[in-house]
Amino acid sequence: MASAGAPTAPEKLRMTQSAHSRPGRPRENSVNSEEAATKFRVRRLAAWFGSQQVLHGLDLDISKQRVTAIIGPSGCGKSTFIRCLNRMHELVPSARVGGEVRLDDEDIYGPGVDPVLLRRRVGMVFQKPNPFPSMSIRDNVLAGLRLTHQLARAHANEINEKALRSAALWDEVKDRLDEPGAGLSGGQQQRLCIARALAVEPDVLLMDEPCSALDPIATARIEDLIHTLRERYTIVIVTHNMQQAARVSDRTAFLLTGELVEYAPTDRIFTAPSDKRTEDYITGKFG
Amino acid sequence: MKHTGRRGVVIERLFVALCLGAVIVPLGLLLILFADVLSDAVQRLGWAFLTSFPSRKAALAGVYPAFVGTLYLSFITAGLTLPLGVGAAIYLEEYERRGRLANLIELNIANLAGVPSVIYGLLGLGLFVRIAGMGRSLLAGAATLALLVLPIVIMASREALRTVPLSLREGSYALGATRWQTIRQVVLPMAFPGILTGSILAISRAVGETAPLIVVGALTYVTFLPDSLGAPFTALPIQIFNWVSRPQAEFVLNAAAGIVVLLGTMLALNAAAIFLRNRYQKRTY
């Protein structure tokens, strides 16, 4: 397994410097080649809520600049899994994590790693669009930088436009940037949340059922967006919609009661699953 | 489906009538009371009443020092209560949510809110007037009132903080904000109108309190304005209490006028609360 990322990766999380002073993300030529570098290496990952164990020792590698889908029935631990990748899981009182998660070969649960800095590299989009209701569209996009006091006024407009363009929302909102973000439609709000996550310049985008509150048209737009974002970001998407997993992802992991049943290229999972339980799930026998 | 017929309609109407009655009866009583007070008060109310010092002659006596004392008290009380109350609420709601300590504190706060105000007066007398050596001063009075309303302000602020949805906090954390940045820039702005309303209502309640101020030692006959935090003072409820308990019948008119001034002050405070809340909510969409 080739180690991924810039050689300075291990220092990144401990850096107190702003995300924007970081040297530009190295463009990989291997984006479309078969072999992709590993972004996340997950080993024996276990997670608990109180005394209830929800993840039972997961092992998987997530490739850089690929879309990885996590599927499985409700309560199988898929949301918990991605919340372990940006250390959001531990925000819940009584929640606990075991095992190892390496991002660009650095243990994100290692001593001295600041989860706050980690989350600036690993962005997240939630199930229900959650723009900040007290902020305008522009302020929502810039919220991550403003919250963390990294915003240089001179670049604000530039960053705002770039993030909104990346989230395919610019053309729809460019004339009303000062209007409240909560006034947009559900699909637009979700793209606003994606823009907000992108403005912080993460490497990874975690998406926790990002379309489950959206109509089919808005869903299609988000899926198109995922296709374009794939060129620059590593994307991990949790979905309960198997067609969606098939449409957007390169690899798919099937989770069942907190265990990884099967992890393979998406077309193989959906055409020739090697595990009987995977087959039963994707053919709709349960779940 | 049993009650959707004629009987259902009758029950429905009966219920509406009952609810309407529940609105009209207390409002009516309040109106009668107010009309009665006002009919006495008109003979005294006027600019002179507001700007005169107390006097032995009822017709010349005014509420000036009491009115000013009440205003000072309410501002100082607000200044003492808000930081303490909001700070405590933030701690309990955001930092110490499930701990045993939080439960203990919560239980105590709920109990404190039910303690009679005269007890707070005694506490204020012992703690602020005697031990802290503040004497029978404006500061001691305001500190006592602050103690009295603190539990209410804490509870109102916690309630307001609780209405900020978890999804917004998570959205903020996911952007790499620290807990303090999240509280400061996401949670507090959203909770602010609620905190403000609850606090102003609590303080306007404190403004009407008499018992703790009597115990702490507010004066009843004051011919000067308090010029510092350490100065002796009086307040409207005390002045009213004093006039009511006088044997001369004319002073009852003064008391009525004093009541109208006190009511006006409290209504103004409440109106300010509503105004600020509306304004702030509009700004935050």
Image (cartoon, coloured by chain):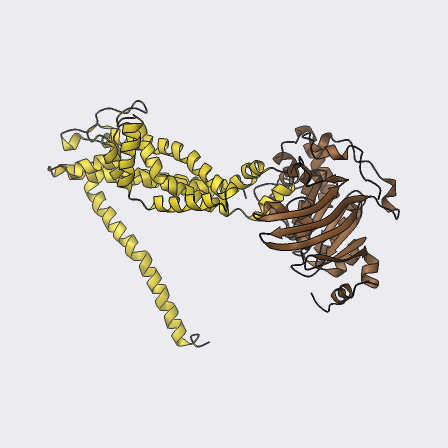
Chain colours: A brown, B yellow
Q: Quadrant of residue B118?
A: top left
Rendered position, B173 above or below A249: above
Q: Farthest residue toward the top? A: B227
- Please give left or right for residue A34 compared with residue A174 in the image: right
Residue A90 visible (yes or no): yes
> How many tags in the picture?
0
Picture residue at 80% right of the left edge, 53% below the top: A251
Picture residue at 19% right of the left edge, 42% below the top: B40
Rendered position, B238 above or below A284: above
Measured as percent of width and height from the top left, residue B142 is found at: 32, 32
Give the position of the C terminus of chain B as an image quadrant: top right
- Please give left or right for residue B68 compared with residue A88 in the image: left
Q: Nearer the viewer, residue A36 or A57?
A: A57
Measured as percent of width and height from the top left, residue B42 is found at: 21, 39
- Please give left or right for residue A24 compared with residue B158 in the image: right
Q: Nearer the viewer, residue A95 or B95?
A: A95
Measured as percent of width and height from the top left, residue B223 is found at: 21, 25
Residue B279 visible (yes or no): no
Measured as percent of width and height from the top left, residue B65 is found at: 25, 28
Q: Quadrant of residue B172?
A: top right
Rendered position, A243 above or below B127: below
Q: Nearer the viewer, residue B120 or A169?
A: B120
